[in-house]
Image (spheres, grey):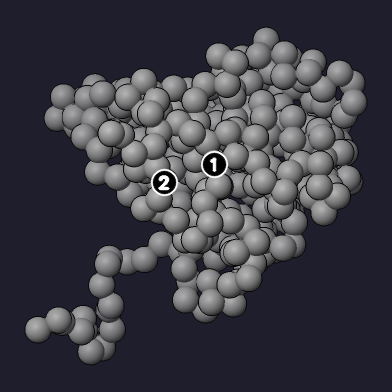
Amino acid sequence: MIDPHKFTSPYQLTKSMHRDVYPAVDARRPELSAKGKVVIVTGAGGGLGYRVVEAWATAGAAGIVLVGRTESTLKHTAATMAGSIPTLVVPTNITSVDAVESMYEKVKERFDHAHVLVDTAGVLCFGSTLAKSEPDEWWGAFETNVRGTYLLSRGFIRAFEGVGTIMNFVSIAAWENAPGMSAYTVAKSAIMRLTEMLHSEQPDLRVFSLHPGISARDEDRGMFVPAFEPFCKDKQQLTAGVTLWLSTSRADFLKGGFVSVNWDVSELEAHKDEIQQKRLNKLAMLNARLGVDGQPWAG
């Protein structure tokens, strides 16, 4: 029998695990109000991006900027807001310096300022081992996933004076040595390190690496890998709700690190001092204890 939690349970920091929306991350919760905040959502035409836009609209955002490759899908997402929230649709090639800078100029023209960037945009490259891969296709995953994240983060900092919140979508795949997924896993690892560097360099910036769980296509939106269907148990609305929670000061103790939507946020808050002191959500250099005395060997 296939264990549907095979790629979820091993990465739990909290004892409680969630795969669907629960009260603490419900977009209708008053404590998660987005009143006064303008959010930029990349990949807004895809499944996760769509649900993020939906959640921020429910939470009463002051404005939502929809960024993605295809104007028609972005407009479709915007149309679902039914005029309830001011929106701005900006088709953007996130691997282009000029396109990203132009996007931020349009945001400033419309809203003057943006407070949050939720970067869901990305591509999934898999199927070939490194030896059999096509160089342009393999590196293309870096162009979108890493260069795109870099340009979006760089642009946000420059446009809004290094103040605000950035959530970079990553994946537990970064820790899985799955043959045929080298481009994707290495790119997601790079984004996590980029996020930690942003945290180090920009003291006024709140930045997180967010694992959005493993979800199926939502109404034919988003990416889907058939082989992972038995494990696609996470509701995209869960991820959307967690982005709202991360935008609040309650999540400050997790800044600069990795966060999984499957972790229970109340349990995290209850242990925030230990998480900070032991750097439990930060990347570690090797699975060893390094220092002047070296690794304490078992024998």
Q: Is residue 191 left or right of residue 76?
A: left
Give the percent coordinates (x, y) of residue 105: 76, 33
- Quarter occupied by residue 2: top left
Characterize the local packing of mark 1: few (<14), some (14-19) or many (20 or more) Cα atoms within 10 angstroms.
many
- Distance of mark 2 from mark 1, alpha carbons? 9 Å
Give the percent coordinates (x, y) of residue 69: 59, 19
Number of marks in picture: 2
- Quarter occupied by residue 266: bottom right
Q: Residue at x 39, y 25 (%)?
A: 229
Tag of residue 8: 2
Residue 27 seen by the camera: yes
Q: Which residue is mark 1?
A: 19
> Which quadrant would the C terminus be assigned to in this image?
bottom left
Q: Residue at x 21, y 34 (%)?
A: 179
Q: Residue furthest front?
A: 1
Q: State whether residue 193 is above or below residue 63.
A: below
Q: Identify the amino acid type marked 1.
A: Arg
* Mark found first going from the N terminus, 2 or 1: 2
Give the percent coordinates (x, y) of residue 109: 85, 32
Q: Identify the amino acid type marked 2.
A: Thr
Tag of residue 286: none
Q: Is residue 38 left or right of residue 76?
A: right
> Which quadrant would the N terminus be assigned to in this image?
top left
Give SS at disc 2.
loop
